[in-house]
Image (tube, coloured by chain):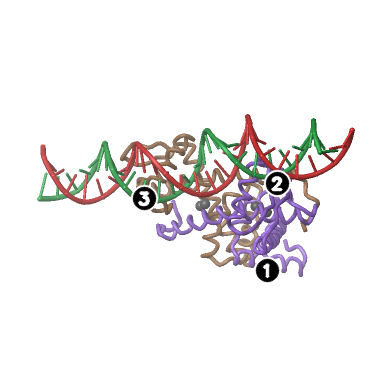
Chain colours: A brown, B purple, C green, D red
Amino acid sequence: MPDQPAHPKDQADRFARARESQSVALLEDYVEMIGDLHAELGEARVADIAERMGVAQPTATKAISRLKREDLATSRPYRGVFLTEAGTLLADRVRARHRTVVAFLVAVGVPADVAELDAEGIEHHVSRQTLKAFERYLANVDARGRRR
Amino acid sequence: MPDQPAHPKDQADRFARARESQSVALLEDYVEMIGDLHAELGEARVADIAERMGVAQPTATKAISRLKREDLATSRPYRGVFLTEAGTLLADRVRARHRTVVAFLVAVGVPADVAELDAEGIEHHVSRQTLKAFERYLANVDARGRRR
DNA sequence: GCCGGTAAATAGCCATAGCTATAAATCATA
DNA sequence: TATGATTTATAGCTATGGCTATTTACCGGC
Ligand SMILES: [Mn+2]
Ligand SMILES: [Mn+2]
Ligand SMILES: [Mn+2]
Ligand SMILES: [Mn+2]
């Protein structure tokens, strides 16, 4: 019992878009974290990246190869990983979006710990327009206190 | 510049959870759509499933194999695909969640067309608790009219 | 009932993202 | 400075989810 008769092409485009977002999600999470590691530790070692991502070390190495291929990072063997200009920009954008999504979820009544968990996946599918809507919502909450 | 010093294990668990949600996402979208097709057309043919998913026919066939393996669907060769009890339950749950996510996004100010697009990816990362929060929010909106 | 057209299945390719096991490089310290 | 410990890279495996090309099954009309 779908809402409308469904336009196959539109629906297909929707799925294609979600698949595309997904394929970028891994890149986003890695660059964000590499940026975090530089801010916290002054460097991003493969071992630390792997630990925080919750994957085996060769899995992280392989992901880093993809970052390099997409010009988001460079690395000096046995010397750590570095974000390019583009990587830094992406990391900052992704980090800001991540925080907005978490804050927004909390603002609409999601428990903080759950918000953190869900945001890790949700963030990658939040478009520019949706992010703007979240920001507007937060601005209102901030200005007028918790609405009920 | 992360918010807190970051607990590597917690963060790793968060990523693991997002990966798990992702691996279920495809199953969810397929069962929802197969349910839709049965409601609309009385049957779910592989060709229609592929068209709506925006993938080639063999890709749909392979996904259906996975649905069968996970006991969400059965199929009679050249005769279409059928949801099991579990598949029907999942489809209904996923369809309801999808609608709630879209309605919620629209309610917080996301343009309807954008809400449709983003929801297709977001929905799979919305936990039970977050969904409850969305429902509460919508109930308030319904009861008291559009808040500003 | 046969035969052509359509639909589905199968074969076999590629890329991604995970893993373990092992080799190689670096580093610390004796 | 040699050596052992640690870290990183590499090799090679699996599963998923895309694809195209081809074969097989079904079905409707003659
Ligand atoms: Mn994430
Ligand atoms: Mn994130
Ligand atoms: Mn979806
Ligand atoms: Mn959906």
| Quadrant that contains the C terminus of chain A | bottom right
User: Which residue is denoted by mark 1 in the rendering?
Assistant: B136
The answer to whether the residues at label 1 and label 2 have Cβ atoms under 8 Å apart is: no
Q: Residue B27 at what x, y percent from top left?
A: 62, 54
Chain letter behind tag 1: B
Foreground mark, 1 or 2, reads 2
Mark 3 closeness class: few <14, some 14–19, many ≥20 residues within 10 Å: some
User: Which residue is denoted by mark 2 in the rendering?
Assistant: B46
- Left or right of C22 on screen, residue D22: right
Mark 2 → mark 3, Cα distance in angstroms: 45 Å
**Which structural element holds mark 1?**
helix
Mark 3 → mark 1, Cα distance in angstroms: 40 Å
Q: Residue C8 at what x, y percent from top left?
A: 69, 45
Q: In which quarter of the image is residue A115?
A: bottom right
Mark 1 → mark 2, Cα distance in angstroms: 38 Å
Q: Residue B68 at what x, y percent from top left?
A: 62, 55
Q: Is ligand 4 closer than 8 angstroms to the Cβ of mark 1?
A: no
